[in-house]
Image (cartoon, grey):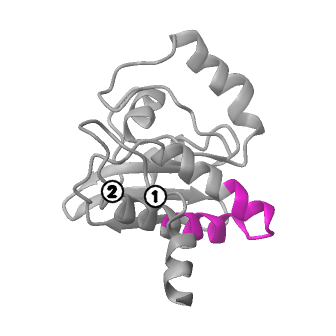
Amino acid sequence: VVDPVMVDSAGTPLIRPEAIDAYKESLFPLATLITPNFREANLLLHRTFSGDTDEDIRALCRWGNAAIVKSVPHPEGLMDVFYSASTGMKTFVKAKVDTRNVNGTGCTFSSSIAAYLSQGHTLYEAVCLAETYIDGAIRVGATYRFGTGFGPVAHFYRRSEAGRTAE
């Protein structure tokens, strides 16, 4: 699972163009899944990603992998668009959560997919489980208050929920 960290949340590139080429030529062909966010997908495609048809998401799979694009703007909030040869295009639409605690969202999402794959889940099952996990981590993280800047998602929210349930 490759999370191609290429741009920051403001859209500023974090890597040089030749590094993007290295992702495409060397790393993506080895990956089962790539997880670019909306801005990174735009950079990889050299155009604005649209989740309306499967054309763009399939274009991100040209390196022989599956892809999921995170945080695509949608009238109902945000949409994640997944494509694999075995499932076709699937979308996950969620209401946008008003929070500044979004640091690590993409990394946490891609890592959770890898963790679910290591437990024997299919790729699509792992993506569905990771979608549920990251949505909860964002929602619970939105209740935390950390100074004035951006904070993290609630990585361990399930553990704290389990503790409250057991009491």
The answer to whether 79 appears left or right of 160 in the picture is: left
Please state which of residues 53 and 72 is positioned toward the viewer in this rendering.
72
- C-alpha distance separating marks 2 and 1: 8 Å
The answer to whether 97 appears left or right of 54 in the picture is: left
The answer to whether 132 appears left or right of 114 in the picture is: left
Please state which of residues 137 and 129 is positioned toward the viewer in this rendering.
137
Secondary structure that dominates the magenta span: helix
Q: Is residue 145 visible?
A: yes
Residues under numbered marks 2 and 1 in contact, where contact means CB atoms less than 8 Å apart: yes
Report the disc number at residue 154.
Answer: 1
Residue shown at 36% from the left, 53% from the top:
51
Report how many numbered discs are placed on residues in the image.
2
Neighbor class of circle 2 (other Cα within 10 Å; few <14, some 14-19, many 20+) is: some
Give x and y (percent) for residue 132: 49, 70
Residue shown at 49% from the left, 45% from the top:
106
The three-letter amino acid code for the residue at tag 2 is Tyr
Give x and y (percent) for residue 59: 52, 41
Residue shown at 26% from the left, 52% from the top:
99
Give x and y (percent) for residue 66: 63, 51
Query: What is the quadrant of residue 13 in the picture?
Result: top left
Please state which of residues 158 and 79 is positioned toward the viewer in this rendering.
158
**Range of the magenta residues?**
114-131
Q: Name the residue tied to disc 2.
A: 144
Neighbor class of circle 1 (other Cα within 10 Å; few <14, some 14-19, many 20+) is: many
Report the disc number at residue 56.
Answer: none
